Image: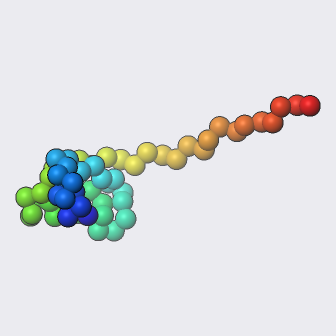
Amino acid sequence: MLDVVARHRSPVVVAATGGPPRLDARTLAEAAALRGAPFVHAVTPAGWVPPPLRLAPAG
């Protein structure tokens, strides 16, 4: 993933703290520090909210 970030010259990576194994923010931050890659900003994943219910018009 850090290779893709470097290829696109992104200065910052935003990653979820509860991401999949080996792709969470902590792992990416450690890898970035070892490689001298961009800063990894950790964020808490947003909770899922169901879309509003659309009712069909009466008639």
Seen in the picture, residue 53 relative to 41 is either above or below; the reply is above
Toward which corner of the image does residue 59 lie, by quadrant? top right
Q: Residue at x 65, y 37 (%)?
A: 52
Seen in the picture, residue 11 relative to 5 is either above or below; the reply is above
Q: Position of residue 35 (x, y in %)?
A: 9, 63
Q: Is residue 46 left or right of residue 41?
A: right
Toward which corner of the image does residue 32 lie, by quadrant? bottom left
Q: Position of residue 15 (x, y in %)?
A: 30, 53
Q: Residue at x 20, y 64 (%)?
A: 3
Q: Nearer the viewer, residue 44 or 59?
A: 59
Q: Nearer the viewer, residue 8 or 24?
A: 8
Q: Is residue 45 left or right of residue 52?
A: left
Residue sticking out furthest to the bottom: 21
Q: Residue at x 83, y 31 (%)?
A: 57
Q: Position of residue 55 (x, y in %)?
A: 77, 36
Snapshot colouring: rainbow
Which part of the image, by quadrant, shows the N terminus?
Answer: bottom left
Q: Position of residue 31 (x, y in %)?
A: 16, 64
Q: Residue at x 17, y 52 (%)?
A: 9
